[in-house]
Amino acid sequence: MYESRQHPLLPFNRFLRRWLWHALVAAALLLVSLAFGMAGYAYYEHLTWVDGFLNSSMLLGGMGPVDAPKTEGGKLFAGFYALYAGLVFIVATGVAFAPVVHRVLHRFHLQDGKP
């Protein structure tokens, strides 16, 4: 997917396109995860979609839930969703910034003069 050490640095406009594509993939992952969390809170805790959005987005953002779960199913869902949300945040950040890190490292190796 990325150019190797033997290839020249990607032109800036193609790099921006690559970065935009990665950002869109990360945003799609976050939106799907947000919808999943909203549906889970609506089903298990009988929260409104707005309250489910609030709880899910707070978990995906790393802040923690607003409403404490009251049912056993809701508690299990909230626990597993919190673990999932923490991983999704890390993965989405990695996906979004992978092209930037690759470009910096690629430029470093080109300046180093080694193949």
Image (cartoon, rainbow, N blue to C red):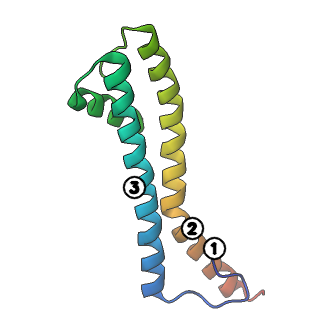
- At mark 1, the secondary structure is helix
Rounded to the nearest whole Å, what is the CA distance between mark 1 and mark 2?
6 Å
Comes first in the chain, label 3 or label 2: 3
Q: Is residue 57 above or below residue 113?
A: above
Comes first in the chain, label 3 or label 1: 3
User: In which quadrant of the rendered image does the N terminus lie?
Assistant: bottom right
Rounded to the nearest whole Å, what is the CA distance between mark 3 and mark 2?
18 Å
The residue at 33%/32% (across/down) is: 38
Query: In front here: 27 or 38?
Result: 38
* 3 vs 1, front mark: 3
- The residue to which callout 3 is attached is 27
Q: Quadrant of residue 68?
A: top left
Q: Which residue is situated farthest in the right direction here? A: 115
- The residue to which callout 1 is attached is 105
| Label 2: how many Cα within 10 Å (few below 14, some 14–19, many 20+) | few
In-image side of 13 versus 97 (left or right): left
In-image side of 95 versus 34 (left or right): right
Residues marked 3 and 2 touching at CB (< 8 Å): no
Residue type of the residue flagged with mark 2: Val
User: In which quadrant of the rendered image does the C terminus lie?
Assistant: bottom right
Q: Is residue 64 visible?
A: no
Q: Is residue 36 above or below residue 16?
A: above
* 3 vs 2, front mark: 3
Residue 10, horizontal then vertical, whole percent: 55, 86
Rounded to the nearest whole Å, what is the CA distance between mark 3 and mark 1?
24 Å
- The circle drawn on residue 101 is 2
Residues marked 1 and 2 touching at CB (< 8 Å): yes
| Label 3: how many Cα within 10 Å (few below 14, some 14–19, many 20+) | some
